[in-house]
Image (cartoon, grey):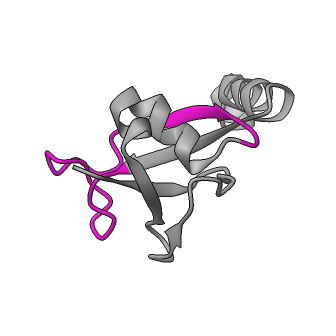
Amino acid sequence: KVLDRWGSTGVQEVINKAVFDAGHFIAVFPVENEAKLTDHEGRVLPDVFLLPEGSTAKDLAYAIHTELGEKFIAAIDARTKRKLPGDYTLKHRDVIKIVTSR
């Protein structure tokens, strides 16, 4: 009856408010292929990282793996294809490719 009347239970809305509004987190999607928005296995947007507001591209690299953070060169915004520096402040729902040295 709740779904018929209101269209949802409201649980997802409560979770979103707790995490993104009260918790001050952002959701960032790392990808390996910025053109197809996929990882190395071809899965589309397989991961999301919840990071504190104010996190940088380099923070994302370290969150994924310490080695990515240590070898970080730049990031690429998958939507705009723009190269981003390590101190770029991430935005909610950014889709980012991390570029590293070998």
> Who is closer to the viewer here, 41 or 102?
102
Q: Is residue 47 visible?
A: no
Where residue 16 appears, as percent x and y from the top left, is 71, 32
Name the main secondary structure of what is drawn in magenta: loop
Where residue 19 appears, as percent x and y from the top left, is 73, 27
Location of residue 22 by image quarter: top right
**Is residue 16 left or right of 23 when viewed as pictured?**
left
Identity of the residue drawn at 47% across and 33% down: 62
Q: Where does the N terminus fall, quadrant-wise?
A: top right
Identity of the residue drawn at 34% across and 32% down: 67
Identity of the residue drawn at 68% across and 24% down: 9
Residues in magenta, as a range: 31-54
Residue extending furthest left? 41
Q: Is residue 15 visible?
A: yes
**Is residue 90 left or right of 76 when viewed as pictured?**
right
Location of residue 17 by image quarter: top right
Relative to 11, is 50 above or below?
A: below
Look at the image and say whether residue 32 sits in the magenta stretch: yes
> Who is closer to the viewer here, 16 or 8?
16
Relative to 83, is 92 above or below?
A: above
Where residue 84 appears, as percent x and y from the top left, is 54, 66
> Who is closer to the viewer here, 43 or 86?
86
Count of labels in the image: 0
Look at the image and say whether residue 55 sits in the magenta stretch: no
